[in-house]
Amino acid sequence: MESEPLTDTTVPNQVEAKTESSEFEKNQERYQALISTFTHEKGWRPKEPFIEYGGHWWIQPLLEGCLHAQEFFQARPNDVFVCSYPKTGTTWLKALTFAIANRSRFDDTSNPLLRRNPHEFVPYIEIDFPFFPQVDVLKDKGNTLFSTHIPYESLPDSVVKSRCKLVYIWRDPKDTFISLWTFLHKERSELGPVNNLEESFDMFCRGLSGYGPYLDHVLGYWKAYHENPDKILFLKYEFMRGDPLLYVKKLAEFMGYGFTEEEEEKGVAEKVVDLCSFETLKNLEANKGEKEREDRAAVYANSAYFRKGKVGDWSNYLTPEMAARIDGIMAEKFKDTGLLEHGQ
C-alpha cells in the first residue's frame, strides 16, 4: 500500500510484486497452521467448511486474508471504508463513494465507472490487500477508499483506532439471504454445488453463513456507531433505494466531500445518483455477460454483481413460514437496540 503508483510493467515492479507475494506465502503458512486449530463446521458447499473465528464464520481464504489485514494493514486518518455484509448493497455503495470522492477529476463521459466494475476502485482489505498486492489502486497513495466484509470486532486495530471513517450498509435479512444464495451459484467454484434453498436458509437463520451470523454482523457495527457516531455512517439499503438523492448528499457530507451551492445548482448530486444507479451500472458493457474485472483474476464475472437490486424480491423464493421465522429472529435479536426504528 505504501509503494509508488504502478505506471508500467517494467521488471522492478514485477520483482516487487513477486517479493510481496512470497512474503505473503510465508505468512500464509502461519495462518493456515493457526486456522487448522479452529472449529470447523459444514458449509454451504460440500468442500468448503465454515471456520469459527471471533464469534463469526469464515471460509478459509477470507480468514487467511483477515488475519493478514489484522497484522499488516495500516489505515490512515483520511481513509474511508465501505463496510458491509455480502449482498447488502456493497457494489452500489462502492460506486457512490468513488463517484463522490472523484467527481472533480472526471466529467460525465470520462468516469472510469463507465468502463470498469466498481469493485476495481475500492479494494477489499481482506482480499485485494493480501492476495493481490499488485493491483493498481493499492499502489496509488492517493487512493483513500477501501472496503471490507470483516465484522467490526475483527477489524484491524488501525481501522478502529485511527481517525478514518466507516460507512456501513445493511439490508432486510430476507433479501440479503436470497441475494447471497443466488450469487453463490454464479461463482466459478470447484468446491461443489451450493446447498438447496431450504438447507441454506436454515443454516443462515442459525447464523451459519460466511462472515455470519448476519444479524450479529449488523449489530456489531450498530453498537460501534452508537459509541462513535462521528466515525461511522450507518445506512439501510431500503431507505437509500427509496430516496437515493438524500442519502448521496448525507454520504458526501460524511466523507468530507459535501456538495457546494454551485454543485447543487448544477445538479451534480443528481448526476452521481444517475451514474451509480443499479440500472445504469447493470447496462454498461463492462458489467454484461462473462466480462471480468481488468486488474486481477476473479471467481465472478462482473455481471454477477447485478441481479435485480429490488426491495422485496425474497417473496418470490421464501414461504410465509420462512419469512416469519427470520423476521422473528431479527425482532428478538434487535429488541431494545433502536435498530429497527433507525431511519437516518
Image (cartoon, helix red, strand yellow):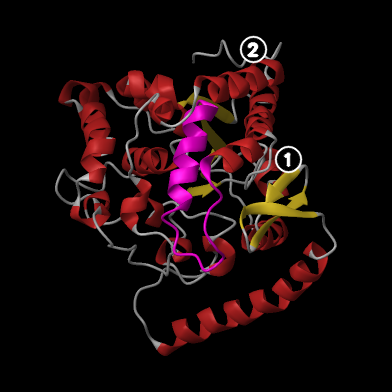
Residue situated furthest bottom in the rendering:
11
Q: Which of 318 and 305 lies nearest the eye of the viewer? A: 318
Looking at marks 1 and 2 on the same chain, the residue that comes earlier in the sequence is marked by: 1
Q: Judging from the image, what secondary structure is the residue with disc 2 in?
A: loop
Q: Seen in the image, is 77 located left or right of residue 344?
A: right
Q: Judging from the image, what secondary structure is the residue with disc 1 in?
A: helix
Residue marked by disc 1: 153
Q: Does residue 250 appear in the picture of this structure? A: no
Q: Which residues are magenta?
A: 172-197
Quadrant into which the N terminus falls:
bottom right
Residue shown at 19% from the left, 25% from the top: 267
Q: Which amino acid type is shown beneath numbered disc 1?
A: Glu
Q: Residues within 10 Å of mark 1 (few under 14, many from 20)?
A: some
Q: Does residue 113 appear in the picture of this structure? A: yes
Image mark for residue 338: 2
Residue shown at 67% from the left, 18% from the top: 334
Quarter-wise, where is residue 186 in the image?
bottom left
Image location (x, y in percent) of residue 220 = 69, 31
Q: Classify 72 as above or below 235.
A: below
Is mark 1 in CB contact (under 8 Å) with mark 2?
A: no
Q: Which amino acid type is shown beneath numbered disc 2?
A: Gly
Image location (x, y in percent) of residue 94 = 41, 43
Q: Gap in Å between the C-alphas at discs 1 and 2?
A: 20 Å
